Image (spheres, grey):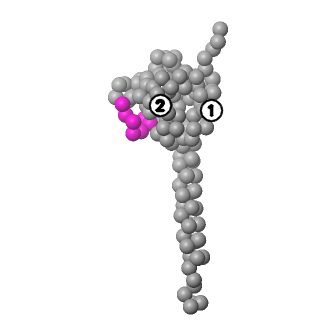
Amino acid sequence: MEVINAGEIVEHAVRRQNINISELSRRMKVNRRTLYNWFQQKKLHLDVICAIGQVINYDFSKEFEEEFYNSGIKLAENDLNTRGGHQHISQESIYYWMEKYIALLEDYKRLLQTTRSEDFGRMNRPNEQEW
């Protein structure tokens, strides 16, 4: 008997909802590789399952009934329709901090690119004292 892991369940739900992986990663503010890694996991943290469910507008409480029951999380219809935030992701969650870290790195990269382009512009202009 083949045992389906949590990642596969989530992946199948994403594909059934016709959600593009790139779009899902953009909405969740994680990279595609992270999503594919999650899809390979036998167990997923409930915060991740809830976050994906909110983005794809899917209720995983039937597939992960025991996990939801043990956690005390009750999903209401309104929670699934809320796309703006991740109510079920606590600040202590590894994934919360991972997303914060990735966003910080992306901001830093943009800052470096801006700084480099400004420096390049100054190098190409003649120094006023030389004229």
Quarter of the image containing the C terminus?
bottom right
- The kind of secondary structure the magenta stretch mainly shows is loop
- The answer to whether one can see residue 77 in this image is yes
Which residue, as the protein is rendered here, is positioned at the far top? 1
Amino acid found under the numbered disc labelled 2: Ile
Q: Position of residue 101 (x, y in %)?
A: 57, 47
Question: Could you tell me which secondary element the residue under label 1 belongs to?
Answer: helix
Q: Is residue 3 above or below residue 10?
A: above
Residue 69 can be seen, yes or no = no
Query: Where residue 37 is drawn, which disc sits there?
Result: 1
**Disc 1 vs disc 2: Cβ atoms closer than 8 Å?**
no
Residue that mark 2 sits on: 19
Q: Nearer the viewer, residue 14 or 74?
A: 14
Quarter of the picture containing the N terminus is top right
Query: First in sequence: mark 1 or mark 2?
Result: 2
State the SS at label 2: loop
**What numbered label is drawn on residue 16?**
none
Mark 1 vs mark 2, CA separation in Å: 17 Å
Classify residue 10 as left or right of residue 87: right
Residue 129, placed above or below residue 79: below
Tell me the residue at 60%/17% (across/down).
4
Residue farthest to the left?
Answer: 78
Where residue 13 sits in the image (x, y, percent)?
50, 23
* Part of the protein shown in magenta: 81-87
Q: Give the residue drawn at x 57%, y 85%.
A: 127
Please state the horizontal and vertical placement of residue 83, each as a whole percent of the image: 39, 36
Q: Is residue 93 positioned above or below 78 on the image?
A: below
Residue 64 locus on image (x, y percent) = 51, 19
Instruction: Name the amino acid type tagged 1.
Output: Asn
Q: Quadrant of residue 84?
A: top left
Point 55% across, 26% down: residue: 11
